[in-house]
Amino acid sequence: MRICTFEQRGTAAAGVVVADDTVLSTVDLVGGATDEDDVLDILLAGEEFWAELRAAAREARGGVPLASAKLRAPIPRPARNVFCVGWNYSEHFEEGKRAHGQAGPQLAPQEIPEHPSLFSKNPATVVGPDAPVLFPAPHSEELDWEAELAVVIGTGGRDIDEAAAMAHVFGYTCANDISVRDVQRRHGGQWFKGKNFDTHLPMGPWIVTADALDPSDLAIRSRVNGVAKQDSRTKHMVFKIPRLISEISAGCELWPGDLIITGTPAGVGFARTPPEYLRVGDVVEIEIEGIGVLRNTIKGRT
């Protein structure tokens, strides 16, 4: 099942992609039997309601065609910061080592650590498909892309064991961890500021629910103006999703609707020779097998 947020009659509504590849609001899909018109509300409603939506989506038709639906981020304004993972693909570690001299120690680890590197992005970074991503001038000219698989938590919990972690996942979506590299280097080795400019976390186009997707070996790619930049598979994650959920939930209760972005593969701009950065007008696409394509354009400030 694909869950999304789309614009309906001028307001945001939770929707489901139904049998004929059109989008129906959740309220319309279940015949007005619910007022759950927000994706966070759907997550809080629990598994019985999810099953009801899934059954209805298999039969329903006649919604808004996907080609004309105006989609927002699946969770347009998360309830709190998005949990983020740095350095989580084996080839990205090697890429970082090679770039160490030009990028500085804050961006390039020397060896694979025992625990994942964690940071967060605030809710104002989140935008949806086709939404503009703001170029960071006058603060920086070093805008970079990072294709990432995002995990959506459906069932909350604290101190979650790895063996039980996947039962807490509602689904998956695409993310682009847009990064301002020189600002990222500037702040003493921590990444928060360089990762937290407004609009710098596009997500979407929808959530594919966990029953419909095995995240362990998916193709993950990025393109800039149609040119391939990253091309890997999620099987190359060093810290797998159960480990990440266990680490993040240690002493920290996860809530339904929490988002975890899981790291990026090799091919980012700062590590290229010479380095490549995004410019105003560039179109960035993130594609993940089984989910779809997330597309955004870099826009100058007016």
Image (cartoon, rainbow, N blue to C red):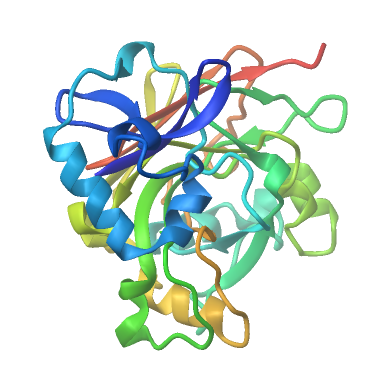
- Residue 30 image offset from top left, x and y in percent: 29, 39
Q: Is residue 122 left or right of residue 247?
A: right
Q: Is residue 296 above or below residue 102?
A: above
Note whether residue 219 is visible: yes
Picture quadrant of residue 82? bottom right
- Residue 42 image offset from top left, x and y in percent: 43, 51
Image quarter (top left, top right, bottom left or bottom right) of the N terminus: top left
**Considering depth in this image, is 72 or 35 the residue closer to the camera?**
35
Picture quadrant of residue 275? top right
Q: Is residue 49 left or right of residue 299?
A: left
Q: Which residue does the image show at 46% across and 81% down from the upper left?
A: 246
Q: Is residue 158 above or below residue 91?
A: below
Q: Is residue 125 above or below residue 47?
A: above
Q: Which residue does the image show at 74% across and 36% down from the upper left?
A: 198
Q: Which residue does the image show at 55% across and 76% down from the upper left?
A: 248
Q: Is residue 232 left or right of residue 211?
A: right
**Considering depth in this image, is 192 or 113 the residue closer to the camera?**
192
- Residue 79 image offset from top left, x and y in percent: 65, 55
